């Protein structure tokens, strides 16, 4: 049973969406000493080099500084973070945490307190923030659809169901922000791509592009916001939309890459995001295959594939595009491989720890942080020398998110 | 007499480099009310949406919030800012201000205080910060060369003269950071490009590429850090280096674009920087001509030119590359033009105020801030609707710099 199916089963046990109290500041039962005091002078700092690490078992965040390469605080009380994603306010002070259980939580990175928290759905898969920072949107499995929330208060502004012809709802995946308070996402069960214009946030207008292919499982927006690509789980290929075209239409790409040629087991769904694009090429995980696909972003045709050590989960370009780092599904998830993009060769295989779940580059790419869940470690590497720089003890770390994401589209 | 020549004359009147006191915190004779108190709680804020505007006549900074679209404070006492540039610490808390008079000043954006200030040269043209945030480097006209400073203290770590064969020194232009604490710059008087490896900051190792062409006047590093391009004032064309090549060498590009075909007067030197690159093309100001050159970044050949309303000074791509905004030298500097990149057409001509000197996009490109020196205004526009969003009263504003630059190479 692949991850999306398992998630759907799990979601049946979740309670329906409900609104919790909106202001939870102060409820921090196990606050660490450095978080306890209201000594604002001690908390005064820049936020451009901060980040958070998800503690997936504890339902907590570890707040980190990429300059000091250490944890500076911890925020518990975030619920089920077995799958979690984070976006940041445009001032890089607040993290919006979207938990598996449908909670959306706004965390102040400076005071390390929860400022607002709502249960916006029963089963959620992530969120996004509008270009102007005024709206956050959650993408939900149960009930299938998106919710538009006020970024300052988490007040619900609009509920947009992902309705299908029969009346059921589709799960939503692949959410990304577009300019002018618009959002784009895909419908796993309906095989469609939707664009929600939230310029009037209480009355979003939704445009639906149908028949994109079977089971879009995740998607990416190119760093310039021009190209949206949804990966398909149910068949070969991906679905692409040029957002700059006068008339929006879906184009199928990479139709024969091999997803469908054999019934390969898939041990973990790969993730897509704008980090796949490096210069003129996109580097995409081949679902079910031990390969990275290299795609020309002019023609959107495959121009190569790179054999790797396992089924790729995250295929992430260093910000300068000179390297692509890859981690893998079980049973190969103790390894990370580094691809040199000009030569398309794997130039290094690292073993940072047990159960590597995620990686995040510092904004200028000089370092990468890698979460090793079963080693309870976050490992920091110099991306040029490939030497370890630091090691942080974190309980069952999964996602790592740095505040520089606030400055980017599609993150 | 073009600007560089005029600057060289002016520099003769400047005093030699000298070290001032290193800690000037508290010396703020005309601090505004909101800067005066040590109330740290009131100062607690994220720094991802901050920026500074140079008050060129007053020698001061106006500190702004791009979320609130207003000034949040002011920092005087910065000396001669008739030409000034700014880089930011990687936590986005501190601005490093490089003044025309050779001063380097570190300003705390949260407390709006000067923390450190040194006279590092007699005549300076800007600075850069290393990828790891540990070093700042100034590029100087007098004495010609670069100075390497500790980013935390502004202590001088190394003085690297730009020596020429005859013993004189060359003025330095076009400084940019490269990965691994390296910096690249051009020698106006020597016609050379230098790379200083400051991984051992007290003993930089300099590699010089000679014979690049006459009078490089400024340069850009592509956003991926791969391509360095120096514009030439003394002849047609530009000099390019591929930083990823196994052996560094200079290639001449755009040799016949027309700089040299007629002795056109140049009213203001254009500025180059990574913002010139939008997707697959670079948009470059044609020195002395009322044109923007469009260059294919694969072949580095000209593929078009766009007639504009005057001699372009800044030619800046919106972060998504969909638009390029252009301002102009006197007498056309009351206008700003907007180019739509897919069609290469000028789609709008704005008149934001008198003497438009600079523009800066918010990191995700939804807004642009434009300084109008002789109107004493900074105008903020929505880049999609082209409608004004805000107007800030600032005394003789010139350069505008947002903290998101901290997250980028070559800025």
Image (cartoon, coloured by chain):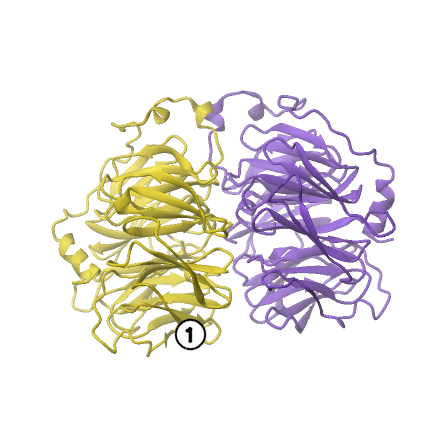
Chain colours: A yellow, B purple
Counting every numbered tag in the picture gives 1
Q: Is residue A393 above or below residue A345?
A: above
Q: Describe the element under mark 1 as helix, strand or loop.
A: strand
Query: At 20% from the left edge and 55% from the top edge, which residue is drawn?
Result: A143
Q: Chain of mark 1?
A: A
Circle 1 Cα neighbour tier, 10 Å, few/some/many (<14 / 14–19 / ≥20)? few
For the N terminus of chain A, the image quarter is bottom left
> Toward which corner of the image does residue A251 lie, by quadrant?
bottom left
Q: Is residue A44 above or below residue B357?
A: above
Q: Is residue B335 visible?
A: no
Quadrant of the image occupied by residue A348: bottom left
In this view of the protein, which residue sits in the foreground, B287 or A354?
A: A354
Tell me the residue that label 1 is attached to: A304
Question: Would you say B192 lies left or right of A377 here?
Answer: right
Residue at image point 33% right, 33% down: A74
Counting from the top left corner in percent of width and height, residue B398 is at 69, 44
| Residue B92 as seen in the image, left or right of residue A275 | right
Q: What is the x, y in percent for residue B309?
A: 72, 63
- Above or below residue B279? Residue B205 is above
Query: Which residue extends farthest left?
Result: A13
Instruction: Tell me: B243 left or right of A67.
Output: right
Is B219 left, or right, of B324 in this rendering?
Answer: right
The percent position of residue A344, horizontal first and vertical second, equals 46, 68
Q: Locate residue B183, reporting x and y percent.
A: 64, 49
Q: From where the camera sits, is residue B398 visible?
A: yes
């Amino acid at each position: 049973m692949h991850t999306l199916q398992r998630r759907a089963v799990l979601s049946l046990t979740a309670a329906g969406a409900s609104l919790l109290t909106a202001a939870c500041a102060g409820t921090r039962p196990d606050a660490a000493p450095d978080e306890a005091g209201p000594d604002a002078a001690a908390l005064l700092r820049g936020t451009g080099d901060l980040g958070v690490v998800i503690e997936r078992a504890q339902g907590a965040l570890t707040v980190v500084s990429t300059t000091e390469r250490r944890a500076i605080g911890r925020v518990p009380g975030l619920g089920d973070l077995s799958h979690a994603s984070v976006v940041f306010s445009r001032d890089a002070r607040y993290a919006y945490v979207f938990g598996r259980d449908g909670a959306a939580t706004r965390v102040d990175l400076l005071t390390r307190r929860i400022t607002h928290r709502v249960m916006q759905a029963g089963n959620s898969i992530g969120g996004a923030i509008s270009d102007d920072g005024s709206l956050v949107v959650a993408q939900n499995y149960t009930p299938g659809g998106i919710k538009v929330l006020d970024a300052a208060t988490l007040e619900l502004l609009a509920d947009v169901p992902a309705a299908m012809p029969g009346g059921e709802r589709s799960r939503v995946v692949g959410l990304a922000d577009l300019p002018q308070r618009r959002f784009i996402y895909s419908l796993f069960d309906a095989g469609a791509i939707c664009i929600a214009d939230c310029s009037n946030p209480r009355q979003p207008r939704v445009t639906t592009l149908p028949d994109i292919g079977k089971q879009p499982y995740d998607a990416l927006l190119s760093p310039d916001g021009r190209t949206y690509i949804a990966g398909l789980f149910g068949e070969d290929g991906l679905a692409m939309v040029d957002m700059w075209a006068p008339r929006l239409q879906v184009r199928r790409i990479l139709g024969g890459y091999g997803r469908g040629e054999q019934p390969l087991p898939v041990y973990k769904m790969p993730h897509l995001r704008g980090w796949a694009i490096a210069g003129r090429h996109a580097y995409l995980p081949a679902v079910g295959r031990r390969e990275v696909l290299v795609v020309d972003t002019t023609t959107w045709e495959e121009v190569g594939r790179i054999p790797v050590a396992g089924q790729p989960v995250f295929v992430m370009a260093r910000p300068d595009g000179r390297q692509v780092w890859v981690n893998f599904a079980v049973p190969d998830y103790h390894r990370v491989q580094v691809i040199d993009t000009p030569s398309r060769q794997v130039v290094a295989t690292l073993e940072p720890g047990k159960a590597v779940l995620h990686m995040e580059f510092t904004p200028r790419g000089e370092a990468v942080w890698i979460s090793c869940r079963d080693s309870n470690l976050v490992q920091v590497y110099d991306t040029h020398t490939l030497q370890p720089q630091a090691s942080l003890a974190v309980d069952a770390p999964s996602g790592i998110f740095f505040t520089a994401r606030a400055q980017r589209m599609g993150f």
